[in-house]
Structure formats: structure tokens, C-alpha cells
Amino acid sequence: MAIIQNLVVVGLKEITRDPKILFFSMIFPLFFLGLFYGMSFVIPSSEVMEMTLIEFMFPGILMMAFASIGFLGTSVPIIEMRQKGVLKTFRTTPLKEITFVLSQVIVRLVLACIQLVIFVVIGVFLNMIDMSNLLLFLVISLLGICMFLIFGFLFGGLFNHVELASGVLSFLMVPLIMLSGAMLPLYILPDVFQTISYFIPITYLTDIYHQFLFGVEGNIPIIADVLIIIGISVIFYWLTVKTFKWN
């Protein structure tokens, strides 16, 4: 436990000292939340979806925070450690691989939970999260966090260069979230994009949030969304184990 604790402390210091990762994972989503909250006073509520702009955008911005921690806050530091030979050095020490991986997961969970608590406080204040459903909201969010962390470790194993990973993941993150229906209603998109959305894992987390928080009619039942997310997470976890490179 002492080894894991030390690795967690070191990992947190490493991430908090990186201005880019800290900004995109902790500050940037809150900036977006404030921006759309201000815009919701100008843009009228949607009569079709029966919700305000900030209500519609809230889950999407929350998932952007999770994606930033999963994509940039997980994959980039792992690639850096591989480039610097840190991962290779770890394999020559008595440190077990599972201990190192567990410490990395805990670091990201701590950051994600901090971000989640901030969003819960804001959501309760804006009457978007009911205290009676708070526990279920947290469980759903933790499920989403785990999925994004698995993606982060997968990309951390696939990419070999930090610059390439940062560019590709930064470019993909927002379009993927938008095509999931988190920031744009799917019904306004062409049919081809609606079809593509079914192959984006984030779509099913978006569907859960919209049904659970605002009573919007979903594409499929919530339990089906949950099972799909769990299935996707298991598949991508298996791919991560098979493709992860230490050297």
C-alpha cells in the first residue's frame, strides 16, 4: 500500500505540473459550462426537447471533462514515460506491473472524482441534479469515467509519440462528443451521421444522461445503454491488455 500511495502522489504531482493537461482536464470544461450557462439566458428553451441550452449541454461538458482526463490526462503521460524509458526501467525493478497500473488508475480516478464533485455541486445548484437520484448519477458517471480511462490506456499503448497523440486525440475528442448527441441533437444531423453515432461509445452514455436527468425519450432503454457501455469497456480493456507496450 505504501508503494501505491507513493506512486499516486508522484502521479498527481506530475499531472498538476503539466499546464496543458491540467487546463484541458480541469479548467477548460468549467469555462465551457460558464459560457453556455450565460448563453442560456439569451437563447430560448427548446420546445422540441423541452429543456434549456445549459441543461442540454451539461452532460456533454461533463463528458468532455472525463474525455480530457481519459485521453490527454492518461495517454500522454504514459507515452512520455515510455519515451523516457521510465516504463522500461520499472520492468527491471521488483515493482509489479499491476501495482504500477493500479496507481495510474487511482491518480486519474482522483482527478475525475474532483471534477465530478464540482459538476454535482453546480448541477444541484442549477436544479439539474435531484438529490434523491444523486447516488444513481454518481454510479452512472463512474461507469463513464472507467470507460474513458480504458480508452486512455489503450491510446497510451498504441501511440509512440506525444505530439502525434496530443494532436490526434485533441482533434478527435470534440467531434466524437458532438456526434454522440451530447452537444448537438442527433435529429438535426444527416442520416449518415445518425448512423455513425451508433458506433460511438459515448452516444450510449449521452443517452443515459438525457433520459435520467431530463426525462428525454431515449433511443434504447437505460439498462441496454448500461450493458452496451460495460460490453464496450470489457472489449477495449482486452484490446488494451493485448496491445499495451512497455518498451
Image (cartoon, grey):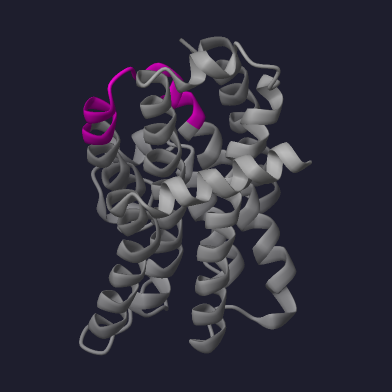
Q: Which of 198/205 is in front?
A: 205
Tell me where residue 214 appears, x and y as whole percent.
54, 73
Tell me where residue 77 appears, x and y as whole percent.
41, 35
Task: Name which residue lies at 48% across and 25% down.
Answer: 154
- Please say whether residue 16 is visible from this viewpoint: yes
Tell me if 42 is positioned left or right of 122 in this view. Answer: left
Where are the magenta residues, as a range? 153-167
Residue 94 falls inside the magenta stretch: no
Give the overall secondary structure of the magenta segment.
helix
Tell me if 5 is positioned left or right of 19 in this view. Answer: right
* Residue found at the very far right of the displayed protein: 1
Q: Which of 142/222 is in front?
A: 142
* Residue 95 versus residue 139 in the image, above or below: above
Q: Quadrant of the N terminus?
A: top right
Task: Name which residue lies at 29% across and 68% down.
Answer: 32
Task: Name which residue lies at 52% across and 79% down.
Answer: 123
* Residue 110 versus residue 31 in the image, above or below: above
Determine which quarter of the picture holds residue 235.
Answer: top right
- Please say whether residue 214 is visible from this viewpoint: no
Tell me where residue 136 appears, x and y as whole percent.
72, 64
Q: Which of 124/4 is in front?
A: 4
* Residue 240 versus residue 10 in the image, above or below: above
Tell me where residue 141 appears, x and y as whole percent.
60, 57
Residue 155 falls inside the magenta stretch: yes
